[in-house]
Image (cartoon, grey):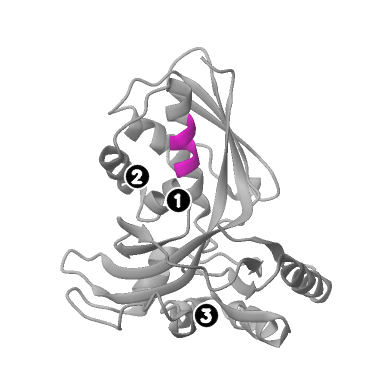
């Protein structure tokens, strides 16, 4: 059995997030283009004596992370243990991504933990079983388990290849305020069975949008300031909010362009979290 397994939980970016409506069961029907940035958390999973899972946290955003059984990393262990025999493990999370920020931090951590648990136990599971396990943890966990650019439909369970990325590099910007996903969807105000807007055209990135921008900005007005700052920067081909906010992004044709924009934003807004990287 290996001494420890390390997995990266990359930031999930909704390059587009079209809300098609709300289903009769209360879930929102989505159509989204998803990609992954280079920024991410680090998960280290090691075998230990005893039973179950323990969790420790370090990193810039560690203070905002609960370490009890409600953490998705711990829940992932419990759900997966229903399908495969797992050793007792100690998990360490290096929390580099802001919390409740629209870039799938908790979901990415859960997905990275699932990958690590399976590697440690040397017990691969069929893809359909893994999708079931991932969905039990949250709508974004399946795509984070995949961790490749794709189109995400349904409530998050339907994944298909994304023909191309609109640009290869990205700047992520978070103004330091949390946005709770459930509250933002509630503020969107859709009733059960209500249709909303049209689906995404994957061949026309210039028509992509994020339907949660307005309710998220109403909850956290600082989002508008981030979007305005990105719009003023030269060298970006598009800018938008990711997920339910408050992280926003700008797309660039080169990593050098993204890093230049990131440096400019850090200089003007030293209290913002800013990261430049390539997309995958």
Rendered image: mark on residue 134:
2
Disc 1 versus disc 3: nearer the observer: 1
Residue 262: within the magenta? Answer: no
Q: Kindly state the secondary structure of the residue where label 1 is placed.
A: helix
Residue 100, given in percent of the width and then of the height, sits at: 52, 59
Residue 81 versus residue 27 in the image, above or below: above
Among all residues in the image, which is located at the extreme right? Answer: 267
Residue 224 versus residue 263 in the image, above or below: below
- Where does label 3 land, which residue? 217
Rendered image: mark on residue 76:
none
> Splitting the image into 4 quarters, where does residue 209 fall?
bottom left
Please state if 73 lies on the left or on the right of 134 as rendered: right
Q: Nearer the viewer, residue 2 or 228?
A: 2
Which mark is first along the chain, 2 or 1? 2
> Splitting the image into 4 quarters, where does residue 229 fall?
bottom right
Q: Residue at x 40, y 55 (%)?
A: 140
Residue 22 versus residue 130 in the image, above or below: below
Q: Residue at x 29, y 61 (%)?
A: 155
Q: CA distance from mark 1 to mark 3?
A: 25 Å
Q: Residues within 10 Å of mark 1 (few under 14, many from 20)?
A: many
Rendered image: mark on residue 144:
1
Among all residues in the image, which is located at the extreme top? Answer: 49
Badge 1 vs badge 2, beta-carbon distance below 8 Å: yes
Q: Nearer the viewer, residue 233 or 88?
A: 233
Q: Which residues are magenta?
A: 111-116
Q: Does the image show residue 84?
A: yes
Q: Kindly state the secondary structure of the residue where label 3 is placed.
A: helix
Residue 136, given in percent of the width and then of the height, sits at: 30, 45
Residue 89, given in percent of the width and then of the height, sits at: 50, 23
Q: Does the image show residue 71?
A: no
């Amino acid at each position: 059995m290996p001494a420890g397994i390390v997995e990266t939980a990359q930031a999930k970016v909704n390059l587009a997030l079209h809300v098609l409506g709300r289903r009769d069961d209360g879930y929102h029907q989505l159509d989204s283009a998803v990609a992954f940035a280079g920024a991410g958390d680090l998960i280290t999973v090691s075998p230990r004596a005893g039973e179950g899972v323990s969790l420790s946290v370090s990193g810039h955003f560690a203070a905002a992370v609960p370490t009890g059984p409600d953490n998705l990393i711990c829940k992932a262990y419990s759900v997966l243990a229903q399908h495969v025999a797992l050793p007792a493990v100690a998990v360490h999370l290096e929390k580099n991504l802001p919390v409740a920020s629209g870039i799938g931090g908790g979901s990415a951590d859960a997905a990275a933990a699932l990958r690590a648990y399976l590697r440690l136990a040397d017990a691969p599971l069929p893809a359909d079983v893994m999708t079931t396990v991932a969905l039990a943890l949250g709508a974004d966990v399946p795509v984070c388990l995949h961790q490749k650019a794709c189109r995400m439909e349904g409530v998050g369970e339907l994944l298909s290849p994304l023909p191309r990325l609109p640009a290869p590099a990205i700047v992520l910007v978070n103004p330091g305020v949390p946005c709770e996903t459930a509250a933002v969807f509630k503020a969107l105000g859709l009733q059960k069975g209500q249709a909303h807007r049209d689906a995404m055209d994957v061949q026309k990135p210039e028509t992509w949008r994020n339907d949660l921008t307005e309710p998220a900005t109403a909850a956290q007005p600082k989002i508008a300031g981030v979007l305005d700052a990105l719009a003023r920067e030269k060298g970006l081909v598009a800018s938008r909010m990711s997920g339910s906010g408050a992280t926003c992004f700008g797309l660039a044709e080169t990593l050098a362009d993204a890093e230049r924009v990131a440096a400019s934003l850090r200089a003007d807004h030293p209290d913002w979290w800013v990261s430049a990287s390539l997309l995958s």
